[in-house]
Image (cartoon, grey):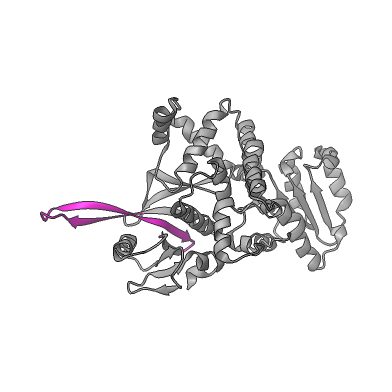
């Protein structure tokens, strides 16, 4: 099944012609190889590039194992690259190639060579792209299927599709597995046989049990404020195990490096500063999150918040948790300082918007609760409230943009309404 990935294909196309190595990173099995060898290659062929001007290599294939030797691959590439016309070098799992950074920089510096690669997040992470390539690479971070990409292949209406999406997530290979048992087995297998093993091997972790327990604690509390010290206390009181906050922080960094989770820092909207702790953590894929908990915890309010966070990130926004402080008078006329929270403060260049995730607004009290933080922000940036359903996109009497989750997710320009 061919599922279009327009956001990432556009990034690759826009990078054509630069003398940078275009590096596609992302959680394992999210579709990086398909993007490069199918979608992008089809684009090249459609633009008139001939097959002999496309140099492909998947280093994880057994048949290509000898090309992992730097000298052998370099000789092969030089024999394929001629003096005229542009040659496109497409390489998968490039971290398996010896001295890969040196070779790719050499190729990218050639006048008629354009280099595009993917790398396993267990070996080629965001920080590696910076250090290994010495400023000669552009990272294109790829996520699992967005809801709009998911629905392009889903056979059913958007409500059923949304329920399936927040249950099993957006890993592309799920479309090849029709039964519930097959989907569950696949998702659990990704953790047990791939992600955990990658993290443990890469970081020389001796006690994987504590790492997995931490993963389960974070999965249970998506969207909840926490920090390494609180998590350390949780281990002590609930697991009767001592795990230092520094170890917790290191494990969290490993999970972020594997693109399994993302952190959202707290931002003081009026003070215009970041608050160091606590913060929130969200999963890159809800199917993976649910698999960690054996599909036991299914709080749709929190899952919807996670979906919104991922969608905002995939649209290129930097996403923080907003804190709004203001002064009120109590019943006796005394002033007191109050803090309230905006779910997401979203920034992209000079653009900013504030987003509230409100599963439902059944009465005036709930509406006031969700609107109160936004009313205390005195700038002119757009303020948005997203509910699950029952609301068509419109501006309410306070000037806040209201919309349902389906219109938000399915329309890439929904925030521009």
Q: Is residue 356 left or right of residue 63?
A: left
Residue 123, percent from left and from top = 66, 39
Image quadrant containing the N terminus: bottom right
Residue 394, percent from left and from top = 42, 74
In-front residue for pair 299/236: 299
User: On screen, 321 above or below 409?
Assistant: above
Give yes or no for residue 116 being in the magenta stretch.
Answer: no
Q: Is residue 28 visible?
A: no
The residue positioned 65% from the left and 46% from the top of the image is 181
In-front residue for pair 176/90: 176
User: On screen, 412 above or below 119?
Assistant: below
Prevailing SS of the magenta stretch: strand
Q: Is residue 267 left or right of residue 142?
A: left
In-front residue for pair 53/267: 267
Task: Work out which residue is located at the far left of the displayed protein and give it.
Answer: 332
Q: What are the residue bounds of the magenta stretch?
A: 323-350
In this rendering, the count of numbered labels is 0
Residue 319, percent from left and from top = 46, 55
Residue 387, percent from left and from top = 43, 63
Quarter of image, res 14: bottom right
The residue positioned 43% from the left and 25% from the top of the image is 240
Q: Is residue 319 visible?
A: yes
The residue positioned 44% from the left and 54% from the top of the image is 301
């Amino acid at each position: 099944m061919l599922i279009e990935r327009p956001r990432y294909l556009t990034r690759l196309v826009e990078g054509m012609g630069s003398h940078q190595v275009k590096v596609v990173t992302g959680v394992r099995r999210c579709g990086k190889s398909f993007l490069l060898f199918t979608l992008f290659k089809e684009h090249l062929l459609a633009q008139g590039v001939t097959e002999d001007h496309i140099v492909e290599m998947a280093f994880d294939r057994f048949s290509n194992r000898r090309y992992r030797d730097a000298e052998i691959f370099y000789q092969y590439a030089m024999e394929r690259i001629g003096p005229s016309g542009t040659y496109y070098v497409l390489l998968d799992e490039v971290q398996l190639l010896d001295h890969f950074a040196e070779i790719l920089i050499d190729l990218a510096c050639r006048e008629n060579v354009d280099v595009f690669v993917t790398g396993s997040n267990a070996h080629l992470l965001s920080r590696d792209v910076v250090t290994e390539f010495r400023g000669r690479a552009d990272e294109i971070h790829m996520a699992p299927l967005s809801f709009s990409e998911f629905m392009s292949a889903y056979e059913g209406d958007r409500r059923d599709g949304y329920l399936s999406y927040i249950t099993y997530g957006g890993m592309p290979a799920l479309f090849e597995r029709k039964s519930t048992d097959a989907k569950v087995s696949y998702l659990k297998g990704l953790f047990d046989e791939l992600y955990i093993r990658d993290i443990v091997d890469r970081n020389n972790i001796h006690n994987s049990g504590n790492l997995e327990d931490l993963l389960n604690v974070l999965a249970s509390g998506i969207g909840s404020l926490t920090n390494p010290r609180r998590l350390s206390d949780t281990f002590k009181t609930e697991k009767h195990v001592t795990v230092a906050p520094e170890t917790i922080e290191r494990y969290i960094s490993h999970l972020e490096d594997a693109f399994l989770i993302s952190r959202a820092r707290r931002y003081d909207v009026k003070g215009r500063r970041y608050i160091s702790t606590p913060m929130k953590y969200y999963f890159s894929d809800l199917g993976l999150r649910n698999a960690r908990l054996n599909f036991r915890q299914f709080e749709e309010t929190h899952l919807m918040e996670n979906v919104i966070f991922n969608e905002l990130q995939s649209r290129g926004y930097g996403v923080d948790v907003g804190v709004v402080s203001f002064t009120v008078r109590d019943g006796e006329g005394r002033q007191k300082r109050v803090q309230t929270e905006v779910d997401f403060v979203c920034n992209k260049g000079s653009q900013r918007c504030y987003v509230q995730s409100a599963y439902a607004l059944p009465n005036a009290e709930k509406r006031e609760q969700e609107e109160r933080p936004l009313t205390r922000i005195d700038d002119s940036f757009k303020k948005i409230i997203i509910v699950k359903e029952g609301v068509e996109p419109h501006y309410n009497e306070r000037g806040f943009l209201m919309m349902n989750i389906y219109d938000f997710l399915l329309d890439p320009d929904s925030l521009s309404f």
